[in-house]
Structures are given as C-alpha cells and as structure tokens.
Image (tube, coloured by chain):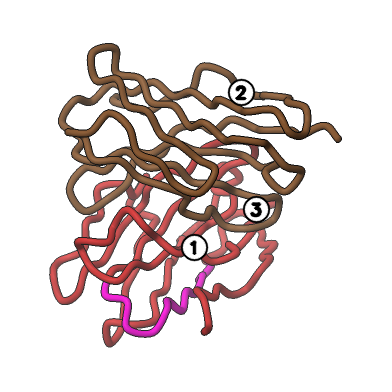
C-alpha cells in the first residue's frame, strides 16, 4: 500500500554539525507533511509541518524542505546538539489522520 | 498542564486473554488517536475519534481490536483473544481539533507483551 519511507535508517553526526534527515513519500494527495521526534521511552513530539503548496519552512534551528517533483521531504537541523539524539519520523496528513514513515535514528557524537 | 496519560504503562498477558488499554487525552481536545508501534518500527495508525463523528476504524488490523471513547474524553482500546503478534507499544495521542491534526500530543504508551 501507500507509505511514507526513509532513505537511511541511522545517521551519526558530530555535535555542532548540521544534520539532514530525508524522507520519500508516494502519495501526492497529502495536504501536509510533518516531522516528529521520538526520544527513547517517550511518545513522539511534533517538530514542524509544511503545507503541500510550500517548498520550505523554517523553525527554531530546523528547516523542512519539500520537493514535490521527486516526492522528497527533508529535515535540516542546524548546529546539532546531544539533545537532538532521537528517532525522527516524517508523516503525511490524509484527511483527519497522519500516516507515519519508519523513522531515522539520529545519533550525535560529542 | 497535564499531558496525555495512558495506563497501564506495561502489560504482560497470556495468549488468548483479553486486554484493555486506557487513554486520558488532554482536557478539551476533541480528537483522539490510537497507534501501534512495533520494536524499531514506525507508528501504525489504528483508529481515531473526532468529536461526535463516527470514528475512523480503517487502521484496525482485525475484528479482535475495538475502541471506544466515552463522553468525548477517555478512550479504551480493547484487544480480544490476544496473539503474540499483538506485542507492541500502543500509543495514544490527542489534538485540539480537526484543524490541528498535524500537532498531536502523544502519551508515553502502553507496552503490551503477549506470552
């Protein structure tokens, strides 16, 4: 069936570097794309979303890019910190629900 | 303020038994969602409730799974005749309304182990 998936299951970066987490999606009908962060033992936490008619949105230290031509979504984290270590999920909104991808585990090395 | 709470935090049950998982959403949130997360996997949508509308049950994996939401607040997810493949973390989330479905607030989850 339709799904939202990720290119890489794990990503390791040095503290202070920028991180880029990628996601591919298959359904062009989704009206929003969203990123969530899940720390160990906790439920996911909303980070940022982007409407499907936009190609870039910035938040605090994070930027989401949407390329509808190749159905690709990315989350950029500036100056990655140890507290950013977590699993990051992309999700797409279809109607009243979210369809989540498999997740990328981000590990930040001190 | 209080976030989404779930109980129990852990549940171990024998194959074939029924289990009930509880979710207390954030007060005033009209939308409530249930997801299942297997080890190292993403979140699998199960069901969602929005106000007084009929729930979207399209994600329930079998007729052994059911959920209800009483009084527009607390929700219970029931799994009958549990199987080992039901072992997972069951997450509940709530959001303010249909316009805020992107920003869901998740509880800590119930870890279900079926032996």
Magenta residue span: B19-30
Specify the farthest residue to the bottom: B71
The residue under label 1 is: B106
Image coordinates for residue A98, horizontal then vertical, percent: 32, 46
| Label 3, label 1: how far apart the Cα atoms are | 23 Å
| Label 1, label 2: how far apart the Cα atoms are | 23 Å
Say what secondary structure mark 2 lies in. Answer: loop
Comes first in the chain, label 3 or label 1: 1
| Label 3, label 2: how far apart the Cα atoms are | 27 Å
The quarter of the image holding the N terminus of chain A is top left
Residue B47 forms part of the magenta stretch: no
Residue beneath the point at 60% across and 64% down: B108
Image coordinates for residue A86, horizontal then vertical, percent: 66, 42
Image coordinates for residue A23, horizontal then vertical, percent: 44, 24
Residue beneath the point at 30% across and 71% down: B96
Dot 1: chain letter: B
The chain letter corresponding to red is: B
């Amino acid at each position: 069936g339709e799904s939202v998936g990720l290119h890489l299951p794990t990503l390791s970066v040095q503290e202070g570097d920028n991180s880029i987490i990628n996601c591919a999606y298959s359904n062009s009908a989704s009206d929003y794309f969203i990123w969530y962060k899940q720390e160990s033992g906790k439920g996911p936490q909303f980070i940022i979303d982007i409407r499907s008619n936009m190609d870039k949105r910035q938040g605090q230290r994070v930027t989401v890019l949407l390329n509808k031509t190749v159905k690709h979504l990315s989350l950029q984290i500036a100056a990655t910190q140890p507290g950013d270590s977590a699993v990051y999920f992309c999700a797409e909104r279809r109607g009243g629900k979210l369809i989540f991808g498999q997740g990328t585990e981000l590990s930040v090395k001190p | 303020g209080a976030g989404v709470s779930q109980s129990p935090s852990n549940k171990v049950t024998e194959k074939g038994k029924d289990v009930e998982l509880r979710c207390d959403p954030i007060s005033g949130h009209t939308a409530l969602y249930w997801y299942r997360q297997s080890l190292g996997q993403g979140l699998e949508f199960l069901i969602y409730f929005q106000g007084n509308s009929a729930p979207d049950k399209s994600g329930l994996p079998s007729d052994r799974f059911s959920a209800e939401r009483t009084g527009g607040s607390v929700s219970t997810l029931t799994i009958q005749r549990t199987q080992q493949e039901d072992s997972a973390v069951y997450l509940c989330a709530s959001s303010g309304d249909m316009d805020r479905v992107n920003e869901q607030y998740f509880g800590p989850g119930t870890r279900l182990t079926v032996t």
